[in-house]
Image (tube, helix red, strand yellow):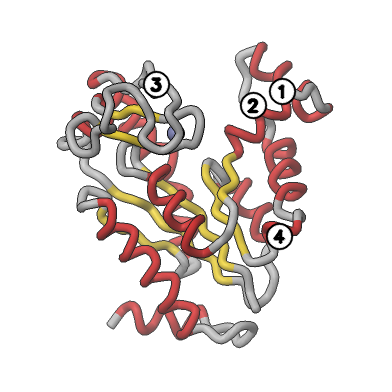
């Protein structure tokens, strides 16, 4: 059986983290965040970590080769046999091209962008509180914790990201669109790009994503090159 590989793209505040967690639980596949992996490598002072830190200290971007290597190694682990969710990777078309070599026949690739409009995002981000213990995400406007500042699930003290400020939110939104466009174009041409409206209630968005994944599994039998067929059906 092919792996379900989900590349999640998301506007800031569109709920990418929340949706990633939902997919992870429902499909029993791990979420792989390159940001987290880099931070971990740096903390553990591995050779990759040292290289990444040197680049970052010099104000440079971590090289594609390094990121590609970290991801390739991670997805070779046993817990990725059924598939995985990529968060923060690929970020560029060259990264996407390298990543395509990791795919095998029969894998189901989904590039899902959780879309949002910049209006209406402000509350979502400025009200957002995250649990550092278990990763649960709260919002003081729509999903407040039972006790202010404390995680319902594990009791840790919640934190608020310093860049969740209104002016910075707009800036991040614009940067996201600029950076992501080439990637969207690349995957659109392959017929594996989907966009869901992230401004709807969280559960609805989750349902849409999971339905999308289920449907494709039925439509494309592994190894029969069904991508074309699926793309055709989607156009009708
Ligand atoms: Zn928690």
Q: For the residues labelled 4 and 3, say whether their Cβ atoms are less than 8 Å apart.
A: no
Q: Which mark is residue 42?
A: 1
Q: CA distance from mark 1 to mark 3?
A: 22 Å
Label 4 secondary element: loop
Is 38 situated left or right of 199 in this image? right
Earlier sequence position, callout 3 versus callout 2: 2
Q: Residues within 10 Å of mark 2 (few under 14, many from 20)?
A: some
The front one of 63 and 15 is 15
Q: Residue at x 55, y 54 (%)?
A: 85
Pinpoint residue 168: horizontal percent, then vertical percent: 30, 20
* Snapshot quadrant of residue 99: bottom right
Q: CA distance from mark 4 to mark 3?
A: 36 Å
Q: CA distance from mark 1 to mark 2?
A: 5 Å
Q: Which mark is residue 159?
A: 3
The residue carrying mark 4 has its beta carbon less than 8 Å from ligand 1: no
The front one of 235 and 41 is 41
Residue bearing the label numbered 4: 102
Q: Residue at x 21, y 48 (%)?
A: 199
């Amino acid at each position: 059986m092919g792996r379900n590989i989900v590349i999640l793209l998301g506007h800031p505040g569109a709920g990418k983290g929340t949706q990633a967690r939902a997919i992870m639980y429902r499909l029993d596949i791990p979420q792989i965040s390159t940001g987290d992996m880099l931070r971990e490598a740096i903390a553990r002072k591995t050779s990759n970590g040292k290289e990444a830190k040197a680049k970052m200290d010099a104000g440079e971007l971590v090289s594609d080769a390094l990121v590609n290597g970290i991801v390739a190694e991670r997805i070779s682990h046993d817990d990725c046999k059924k598939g995985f969710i990529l968060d923060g990777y690929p970020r560029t078309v060259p990264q996407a091209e390298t990543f395509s070599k990791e795919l095998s026949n029969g894998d189901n690739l989904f590039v899902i962008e959780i879309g949002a409009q910049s209006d209406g995002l402000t509350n979502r981000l400025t009200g957002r509180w995250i649990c550092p213990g278990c990763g649960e995400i709260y919002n003081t406007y729509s999903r407040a914790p039972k006790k202010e500042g404390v995680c319902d699930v594990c009791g840790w003290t919640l934190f608020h990201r310093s860049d969740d400020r209104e002016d910075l939110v707009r800036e991040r939104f614009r940067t996201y669109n600029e950076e992501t466009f080439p990637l969207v174009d690349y995957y659109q041409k392959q017929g594996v790009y989907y966009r869901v409206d992230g401004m709807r209630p969280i559960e609805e968005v989750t349902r849409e994503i999971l339905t999308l994944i289920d449907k494709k599994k039925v439509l494309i039998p592994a190894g029969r090159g069904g991508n074309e067929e699926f793309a055709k059906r989607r156009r009708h």
